[in-house]
């Protein structure tokens, strides 16, 4: 996401509103397309669906830069939930909307 933002020439460091909007829109779309749409799908062809969800969730957690085991665990659990939504629905739409809602809650409510 950071690469896309930089490539588009958007400076979000000094603009908290833009950061918040990207966190709720572009971030979930890009991450879900990559992790659940691409990575999980590719891994499922090799490992099966459940291991693919778990491996993808761990990768998802790792890229979020957790600073503690608790943060890593929380990111892994949310990643797995997004993965199971993708698996159950057959589409990244459900995981993307859930991811966006989660980010919205963290950004604007929590």
Image (tube, helix red, strand yellow):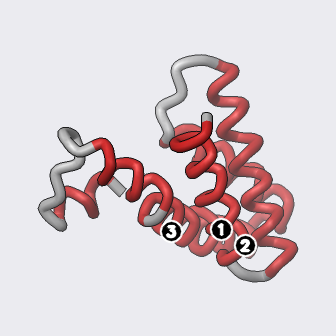
Which residue in the structure is indicated by mark 3? 29
Which one is earlier in the sequence, the residue at label 1 or at label 3? 3
State the CA–CA distance, disc 2 to disc 3.
11 Å
Which residue in the structure is indicated by mark 1? 97
Quadrant housing residue 99: bottom right
Mark 3 neighbour density, 10 Å: few (under 14) some (14–19) many (20 or more): many
Q: Residue at x 26, y 57 (%)?
A: 3
Q: The residue tagged with tag 2: helix, strand or loop?
A: helix
Residue 59 falls left or right of residue 64: right
Position of residue 61 measured from the top left corner of the image (x, y, whole percent):
60, 40
Which residue in the structure is indicated by mark 2? 94
Mark 2 neighbour density, 10 Å: few (under 14) some (14–19) many (20 or more): some
Quadrant housing residue 35: bottom right
Asked whether disc 1 touches disc 2, contact meaning CB atoms under 8 Å apart, the reply is yes
Q: The residue tagged with tag 1: helix, strand or loop?
A: helix
Q: Which of 25/56 is in front?
A: 25
State the CA–CA distance, disc 1 to disc 2.
5 Å
Q: Residue at x 76, y 51 (%)?
A: 80
The image shows residue 86, relative to residue 17, as above or below, that is: below
Label at residue 49? none
Position of residue 15 measured from the top left corner of the image (x, y, whole percent):
23, 45
Residue furthest front as drawn: 109
Mark 1 neighbour density, 10 Å: few (under 14) some (14–19) many (20 or more): some
Q: Residue at x 74, y 75 (%)?
A: 45
């Amino acid at each position: 996401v950071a690469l896309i933002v930089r490539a588009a020439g958007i400076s979000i460091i000094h603009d908290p509103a833009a950061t918040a909007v990207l966190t709720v829109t572009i971030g979930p779309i890009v991450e879900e397309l990559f992790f659940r749409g691409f990575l999980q799908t590719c891994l499922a062809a090799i490992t099966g669906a459940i291991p693919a969800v778990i491996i993808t969730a761990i990768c998802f957690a790792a890229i979020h830069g957790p600073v503690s085991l608790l943060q890593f665990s929380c990111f892994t659990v949310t990643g797995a939930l997004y993965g199971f939504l993708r698996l159950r629905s057959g589409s990244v739409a459900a995981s993307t909307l859930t991811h966006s809602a989660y980010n919205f809650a963290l950004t604007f409510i929590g």
